[in-house]
Image: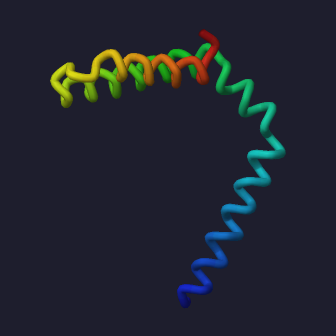
Amino acid sequence: MGIEDLSKKASDLAGKAGEVVNENAEKLQDALKSDQAEEISDKVLDGVAGFADKITGGKFSDKITEVRDNIDGAIGNE
Protein backbone atom coordinates (compact mmCIF):
# COMPACT_ATOMS: atom_id res chain seq x y z
CA MET A 1 0.00 0.00 0.00
CA GLY A 2 1.49 3.28 -1.15
CA ILE A 3 1.36 6.71 0.42
CA GLU A 4 -1.32 7.77 -2.08
CA ASP A 5 -3.52 4.85 -0.97
CA LEU A 6 -3.07 5.79 2.69
CA SER A 7 -3.80 9.41 1.94
CA LYS A 8 -6.97 8.49 0.02
CA LYS A 9 -8.16 6.21 2.83
CA ALA A 10 -7.48 8.92 5.43
CA SER A 11 -9.35 11.46 3.34
CA ASP A 12 -12.29 9.08 2.88
CA LEU A 13 -12.38 8.35 6.60
CA ALA A 14 -12.30 12.07 7.46
CA GLY A 15 -15.16 12.67 5.04
CA LYS A 16 -17.23 9.89 6.61
CA ALA A 17 -16.50 11.22 10.10
CA GLY A 18 -17.67 14.66 8.98
CA GLU A 19 -20.88 13.16 7.62
CA VAL A 20 -21.55 11.37 10.93
CA VAL A 21 -20.96 14.59 12.85
CA ASN A 22 -23.27 16.54 10.54
CA GLU A 23 -25.99 13.89 10.72
CA ASN A 24 -25.81 13.76 14.51
CA ALA A 25 -25.02 17.39 15.32
CA GLU A 26 -28.13 17.89 17.44
CA LYS A 27 -27.48 14.72 19.45
CA LEU A 28 -23.86 15.76 19.95
CA GLN A 29 -24.91 19.23 21.14
CA ASP A 30 -27.35 17.65 23.60
CA ALA A 31 -24.63 15.31 24.87
CA LEU A 32 -22.20 18.19 25.38
CA LYS A 33 -24.83 20.09 27.37
CA SER A 34 -25.66 17.17 29.70
CA ASP A 35 -25.08 16.83 33.45
CA GLN A 36 -22.68 13.97 32.78
CA ALA A 37 -20.61 16.07 30.36
CA GLU A 38 -20.49 18.86 32.95
CA GLU A 39 -19.26 16.51 35.65
CA ILE A 40 -16.61 14.89 33.48
CA SER A 41 -15.43 18.14 31.94
CA ASP A 42 -15.09 19.80 35.36
CA LYS A 43 -12.86 16.97 36.58
CA VAL A 44 -10.71 17.01 33.46
CA LEU A 45 -10.44 20.80 33.28
CA ASP A 46 -9.63 21.09 36.99
CA GLY A 47 -6.90 18.48 36.61
CA VAL A 48 -5.37 20.09 33.54
CA ALA A 49 -5.56 23.58 35.03
CA GLY A 50 -3.99 22.37 38.27
CA PHE A 51 -1.20 20.64 36.36
CA ALA A 52 -0.53 23.73 34.21
CA ASP A 53 -0.51 25.93 37.31
CA LYS A 54 1.93 23.60 39.04
CA ILE A 55 4.27 23.45 36.04
CA THR A 56 4.33 27.23 35.69
CA GLY A 57 4.81 27.73 39.42
CA GLY A 58 1.59 29.73 39.68
CA LYS A 59 3.03 32.40 37.41
CA PHE A 60 0.03 32.29 35.04
CA SER A 61 -2.73 31.30 37.46
CA ASP A 62 -5.11 34.03 36.35
CA LYS A 63 -4.73 33.19 32.65
CA ILE A 64 -5.03 29.44 33.30
CA THR A 65 -8.23 30.00 35.28
CA GLU A 66 -9.62 32.24 32.54
CA VAL A 67 -8.94 29.65 29.82
CA ARG A 68 -10.34 26.85 32.00
CA ASP A 69 -13.53 28.82 32.62
CA ASN A 70 -13.95 29.68 28.94
CA ILE A 71 -13.66 26.03 27.93
CA ASP A 72 -15.99 24.99 30.77
CA GLY A 73 -18.61 27.42 29.52
CA ALA A 74 -18.73 25.59 26.19
CA ILE A 75 -19.17 22.12 27.70
CA GLY A 76 -21.85 20.89 30.03
CA ASN A 77 -24.80 22.81 31.42
CA GLU A 78 -23.29 25.26 33.89
Q: Residue at x 67, y 20 (%)?
A: 33
Q: Quadrant of residue 45?
A: top left
Horizontally, residue 55 falls left or right of residue 69, namely: left
Question: Can you give x and y, in whole percent of width and height, for residue 7 in the image?
Answer: 60, 78
Q: Residue at x 74, y 60 (%)?
A: 16
Q: Residue at x 67, y 62 (%)?
A: 14
Q: Quadrant of residue 73?
A: top right
Question: Can you give x and y, in whole percent of width and height, for residue 50 in the image?
Answer: 28, 21
Q: Quadrant of residue 47?
A: top left
Horizontally, residue 71 falls left or right of residue 19, namely: left
Horizontally, residue 63 falls left or right of residue 5, namely: left
Q: Residue at x 35, y 22 (%)?
A: 64
Q: Nearer the viewer, residue 73 or 30?
A: 73
Question: Can you give x and y, in whole percent of width and height, for residue 65 in the image?
Answer: 38, 17
Is residue 47 placed above or below 3 in the rendered structure?
above
As drawn, the residue found furthest toward the left would be 57
As drawn, the residue found furthest toward the right would be 23
Q: Nearer the viewer, residue 33 or 52?
A: 52
Q: Nearer the viewer, residue 57 or 51?
A: 57
Image quadrant containing the N terminus: bottom right
As drawn, the residue found furthest toward the bottom would be 2
Is residue 41 placed above or below 22 in the rendered structure?
above
Question: Can you give x and y, in whole percent of width and height, for residue 17 in the image?
Answer: 70, 55
